[in-house]
Image (cartoon, rainbow, N blue to C red):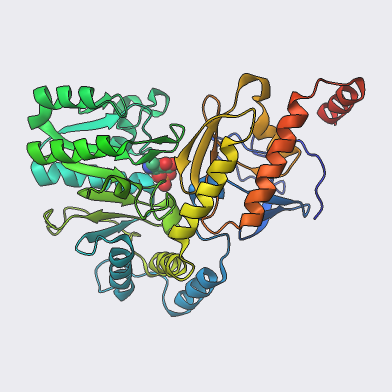
Amino acid sequence: MNNSKNNHEASTVPPLGGGGGVIFDVYPLNNITITKAQGSYVWDDNGAQYLDMYGGHAVISIGHTHPHWVKRIEEQLRKIAFYSNSVHIPVQKELADKLGKISGKEDYQLFLVNSGAEANENALKLASFHNGKKKIVAFEKAFHGRTSLAVAATDNPKIVAPVNETDNVDFLPFNDEAALKTYFQTKGKDVAAVIIEGIQGVGGINVATESFLQLIRRLCDQHGAVYIADSVQCGYGRSGKFFSHDYAGVNADIYTMAKGMGNGFPIGGILIAPHIKAKHGMLGTTFGGNHLACAAALAVLEVIEEEKLIDVAKQRGQYLFNRLKAIDGIENVRGRGMMIGFDVPEDIKDLRKKLLNDHFIFTGEAKPNVIRLLPAMNITRKQVDEFLDTMKEAIAEMKKPPTPEGEKEKVAIENA
Ligand SMILES: Cc1ncc(COP(=O)(O)O)c(C=O)c1O
């Protein structure tokens, strides 16, 4: 390991190699170049090792470069990587079978895409095709993606372009049963779909209550609306159940998936209840369901099964949760399994930066003051302990009154 304090402050895209290639600068970058990854560790180009408590945006489900995943992709690559959806693709069928078995939704139909936004876009469109209605109910703080309807159902006006604005989406307060009932009393007949994350991710790790999800199920049944369970972030075992919506004991009509599905290989999908019927041409994609992506997704499911990762996520997540609760200085620990968030009070508001710069630990954030933990489901107990001990240390350092030497060191680092 070659770790020393660093300043990873956000920067603009650095010039690479003096060539003319310019990246469209939409991401505030940490000043880090990751060149290697394994399990829950990644390494930068200076050889420094980082603990990944963020899974690169909740994407790493079975650990970086898992050997089985690498092997499966390599083997597939040598046979065939891609052919279009105009021929039989047996590996798609294999994926549908395995997904049905592990998720417990064996009679559901699978449509494959490439990302979370695309999964939600297709789910919303399919709902409207199915019942011929137009209104979408979404919830405050929801994030469903950046394509046209998915972004319109996302509660963040800053990322909605004028062309994406629509009267077809109504936002209601999250977990507010009375508001949902009142809405359905007046507008229920027009509702095509209710879309909800079982645990809001970007919104700050807010868990949908079981009774709220049960109410959605009942109201959708009564009014012929489609219940869409956005499981892009909270799905695929991360919550300690295959879909976090399963905690409520209800079946959604459509589950959307991406992120952990390919462990970094781009793939998304929607699982569709049997009563929603397919028609040729109603949905389609060039890349969705390609051989290579299916092999990656199958490898993920095989590892989940082999290593019993849903149980591991539940138990180890509970351990992480309980120990976080006992840490002085952070507030409102919440979440399920390996999807946990907590509030960072004002006096230690730079905790996330400190964890990265001084302690080489990646965590996620949600505005304004939430740290999100979304590690690989097979993060080891030792790594969880390493994170907890380091975080306690970091908080203690931040709460310590500044000494003249410490101040000098801080200025030196800032000026370096
Ligand atoms: C719950 C949820 N839905 C949809 C998306 C969009 O996924 P993607 O970025 O793959 O389009 C995200 C991404 O963060 C998400 O968290």
Residue 398 relative to residue 157: left or right: right
Q: Quadrant of the C terminus?
A: top right
* Quadrant of residue 296 within the rendered picture: bottom left
x then y, percent, for residue 186: 10, 22
Please give the name of the residue rendered at 45% of the width and 59% of the height, measured from the top-left corner: 311
Could you say where residue 318 lies in the image, as x and y percent from the top left?
50, 47
Say which of 14 and 180 sits in front.
180
Q: Is residue 282 left or right of residue 159?
A: left
Q: Residue at x 78, y 52 (%)?
A: 46
The quadrant of the rendering that contains the N terminus is: bottom right
Tell me: residue 348, above or below residue 90.
above
Q: Residue at 46% across / 48% down in the picture?
A: 337
Farthest right residue?
405
**Residue drawn at point x = 25 percent, y = 73 percent:** 87
Q: Is residue 313 above or below residue 54?
A: below
Where residue 66 appears, as percent x and y from the top left, is: 56, 66
Question: Can residue 11 be seen?
Answer: no
Reply above or below: 335 against 292. Answer: above
